Image: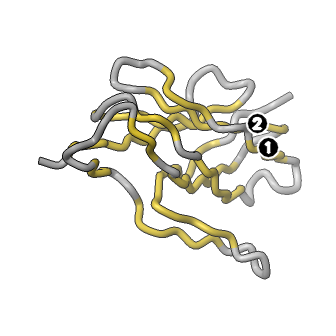
Amino acid sequence: MAVQPQVHLFFPCADASVDEDNSRITIVDPVRVVYLPADVVYPYPCGPVFFFVCLFEGVGKFHCRIDVMDDNGKLVARTKPTTVEFTADNRFDGFDFIVLFPGFDLPRAGTYEFSLCANYVDKPLSTATIRYLKEM
């Protein structure tokens, strides 16, 4: 039986990496607003965006993905799943990981919601928004 993990942190950043020697994660510039060129033509190729995710207290195997929705609730893009497995031995330790949201076509300027989703879970585990604004 799966037990839904809790989200400690979920946020977008400009870059992120994992040190292979010690598994430490380096996060660069959390993102809230992206300014687009004044002469932007839509659809505008956008991204990539990295997401730092910290989950804990789950039980079972989860396939986590990130969906991006426009301000009308329309699905714009989706990542491939990342597998996270909680057991009785590690469920309280938590999992820190990075999800790369590859480039996607931005249909227009506006506020976009990025939802952390997982199998067995009806609602997003967490959400983050990024405002894409056209420079004046």
Number of residues whose C-alpha sits closer than 10 Å to that of mark 2, classed few (under 14), some (14–19) or many (20 or more):
some
In the image, 102: left or right of 74?
A: right
* Of the image marks 1 and 2, the number of the one nearer the N terminus: 2
Which one is in front, 130 or 133?
Answer: 133
Which one is in front, 52 or 94?
Answer: 52
Give the residue number, with chain letter if any, for mark 2: 63
In the image, 9: left or right of 136?
A: right
In the image, 9: left or right of 38?
A: right
The image quarter in which residue 29 lies:
bottom left
CB atoms at circles 1 and 2 under 8 Å apart?
A: yes
Which one is in front, 9 or 1?
Answer: 9
Q: Give the residue drawn at x 31%, y 36%.
A: 41
Kindly identify the amino acid type of the residue bearing the numbered disc 1. Answer: Thr
Q: Give the residue drawn at x 38%, y 56%.
A: 31
Element class at badge 2: strand
Give the residue number, with chain letter if any, for mark 1: 83
